[in-house]
Image (cartoon, grey):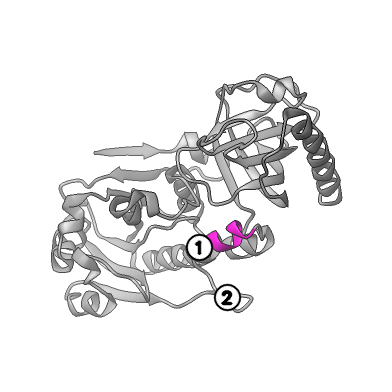
Amino acid sequence: MFFNIFRLIFDRSSTASLHVYRGFPVASDDHVALTIGNFDGVHRAHQAMLARVTEAASDLRLAPAVLTFDPHPREFFAREGAPARLSSIRAKLEQFAAAGVARVYVMRFNAALAALSAQEFIERILRLRLRVRWILVGDDFRFGHDRRGDLALLRGEARDFSVEAMPTVLVNGERVSSTAVRTALADGDLGRAAALLGRSFTMAGHVAHGQKLGTGLGFPTANIVLRHKPALSGVFAVRVRGLGALPRDGVASVGVRPTVKAGARPVLEVFLFDFHESIYGKRVEVEFLHKLRDEERYPDFDALKKQMHIDAEQARQYLASHP
């Protein structure tokens, strides 16, 4: 199956369309320079990989391409124990397009793919379907059934394509990885997460109707449904994009709202300062700039309302001092 993602995402910065394949055509029309990975968060190491694959593609006159997976392999094998997602497929596509990638192959990770041996993956996917001529992977890249394939095997099988390993990318002496970003977010260290990502951490989604509890407390919130476990929790000073030419300041809560309901699913709620428009159904992007506190359970709604006033004032002060 083949489809294009173009005006919807890329009017902001690009006139070229990004060709996105879910699955693969019978065979690629021409040869590609390819990089492979989950690219969760598209952090600075991923960005370096994208820059290198587009550079090599230009030198070799090939199409720069990305092969990624959905769901994350760890979600397939152990959904409940899988790591929190740092970015959606859409967010990844936006980053790929911004880096100059021409094609993205989104491969569904399922039982059939998990059963492929490393040699079958090379022959059926890389050689026959994608017709690769140049491949870039991380130095810890593993693939194939039971993760038996590695960089050495890939190079040993590369009779008609070349293989390059991406060196480790360090920020402040720390190896950049999706795991490191998740750890920083879980610790509430948004500065460290931003340094690893190369930008502030964001979450995006469509505003949905909620229980209107915030409205009753004097804090009408934009409720954003979370399809996956969030990488952070607590109360934050944020800026929200997608509601006009300029971002809107606000305070956001990510969590299970223990004062409201026990055992609830995580939700992202945003209270926008000095904003009174109806925005149901709109897609917004929430930029997390500063953590105010952890999520807490309060004895009653009056105590919660008092704390919400404190949170809002602290967020206003932080955002005013960080324009």
Q: Quadrant of the N terminus?
A: top left
Answer yes or no: is residue 66 visible: yes
Local packing at callout 2 (Cα closer than 10 Å; few below 14, some 14-19, many 20+) is few
Q: What residue would you read off at disc 1?
A: 47
Q: Earlier in the sequence, mark 1 or mark 2?
A: 1
For discs 1 and 2, the disc positioned in front in the rendered view: 2
> In the depicted view, which residue is nearer to us: 178 or 215?
215
Answer yes or no: is residue 102 visible: no
The numbered disc on residue 221 is: none
Q: Amino acid at mark 1?
A: Gln
Q: Which residues, given as a range, are shown in magenta?
A: 182-187
Q: What residue would you read off at disc 2?
A: 174
Q: Amino acid at mark 2?
A: Glu
Asked whether residue 160 is drawn in magenta, I would say no
Image height check: is 230 above or below 306? below
Image point 57% across, 26% down: which residue?
282
Q: Quadrant of residue 160?
A: bottom left
